[in-house]
Image (cartoon, rainbow, N blue to C red):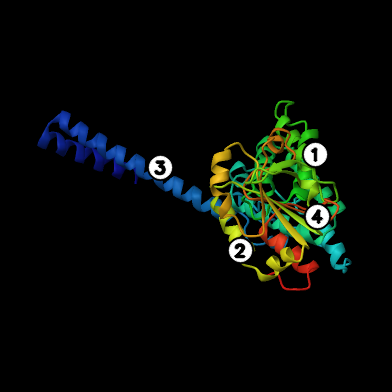
Amino acid sequence: MKNRVKNSLRNRFEYLVNEYGAYTAALILSGFLTLITFSLIALLLLAACRQNRTDTPSGDGGNGVPAIKDTVHVAHYIRPEIPQMMTAPEQRAAYYVKHYWDGYSLADTAFIHSDDTEQLYADFLNALQYVDATEYRSALQSMMSRMEADSTAYAHFCTLGEKYLYDPNSPMRNEDYYIPVLEQMIASTRLTELDKLRPADRLKQALKNRPGMKAPDFSYVTPKGKQARMSGITADYTLLFFYDPDCTNCREVEQILSEMPAFVEMQEKGILRVLAVYPDEDENEWLLKSSQMPRGWIVGWNKQGDIRSKTLYEIRATPTMYLLDKQKKVILKDASLEQTIQYLSAVYPGPIE
């Protein structure tokens, strides 16, 4: 067999030499041999691939053979499994928020910055409403402490806290939740002293004017030039309405409140007084548009400017509303329109909505 192949090649080469010449014959034979070589290599690789597929364990680990982990689809998050022995709803909720982040992977930077992580964060905040203050404070601080293991994760969760819990336009804004986050940031070894200046200032403001605290007094001037003080208002409830004459949102809230019969009735009966205060410097703009404010509201300008200069009240957006009781203690701090209506609906027998 070997001799027949050799003789066949020799005869073919002699034919090529006679037909095309020695040089051309050599080129043709060389190309032919190269083609054969590449074909053999391809066949060997194909055989190797088939062998690997045959040797690779698959399935669910039957017969004691473990399944190969698919690293492309590794679970980045596993929700906590609540022990079956826990039957009380409050106990189950407490366990859930305490262990919520245990199954969160810090290995993938892309996942940390993904929409999935942001959705997990929002779901976590929703779950906190089912536990008491001690448990949600602990859960929030544990979350931040866990993220400290990775600088990227920690920085991103600091940003998420600002976006969801601090931003005045966030529907999930919640100072009670943001305070333990800020406390953990100030104590963190991940942040430099310079990095801690902003959270420290925010914590200082968050701890001011908390519900139950006495609201800071201030002076104001009416459009007719009369000097007065906030503490001089007599009513069961005082709604502080910090606004800007050019604020579109302010106009919308003013209209909604002024068109609520029960809200107006509370004012007419002296149960509620609304003090609309302009805290900035443009007196002419304020005075020009002061007549546009709803009837029955007390309209004033903080001429002294101490609301801003001393940060008596933190006003990050307008309108900012504080609801005070008869002793001028804070009931609602930086309240939304919905929170204000909900509270007044509960204390006044007539429907506010």
Q: What's the residue type where badge 2 is placed?
A: Ile
**Residue sitting at x 65%, y 53%:** 75
Give the percent coordinates (x, y) of residue 168.
64, 48
Q: What's the residue type where badge 3 is placed?
A: Ile
- Nearer to us of marks 4 and 3 is 4
Q: To which residue does mark 1 refer?
A: 183
**Disc 4 to disc 3, how far (Cα)?**
96 Å
Give the percent coordinates (x, y) of residue 256.
61, 63
Could you say which disc has been placed on residue 77 in the image? none
Going from N to C along the chain, the mark reached first, 4 or 2, is 4
- Nearer to us of marks 4 and 2 is 4
Going from N to C along the chain, the mark reached first, 1 or 3, is 3
- Nearer to us of marks 1 and 4 is 4
Q: Residues within 10 Å of mark 1 (few under 14, many from 20)?
A: some
**Disc 4 to disc 2, how far (Cα)?**
24 Å
Q: Residue furthest left?
A: 19
Q: Nearer the viewer, residue 145 or 243?
A: 243
Q: To which residue does mark 3 refer?
A: 41
Residue 180 seen from this side: no
Q: Quadrant of residue 225?
A: top right
**Picture layout, residue 139 above or below residue 198:** below
**Disc 2 to disc 3, how far (Cα)?**
80 Å
Could you say which disc has been placed on residue 256 in the image? 2
Q: To which residue does mark 4 refer?
A: 234
* Quadrant (top left/top right/bottom left/bottom right) for the C terminus: bottom right
Marks 1/3 in contact by CB < 8 Å: the verdict is no
Q: What's the residue type where badge 1 is placed?
A: Glu
Going from N to C along the chain, the mark reached first, 2 or 1, is 1
Q: What's the residue type where badge 4 is placed?
A: Thr
Q: Residues within 10 Å of mark 4 (few under 14, many from 20)?
A: some
Marks 2/3 in contact by CB < 8 Å: the verdict is no
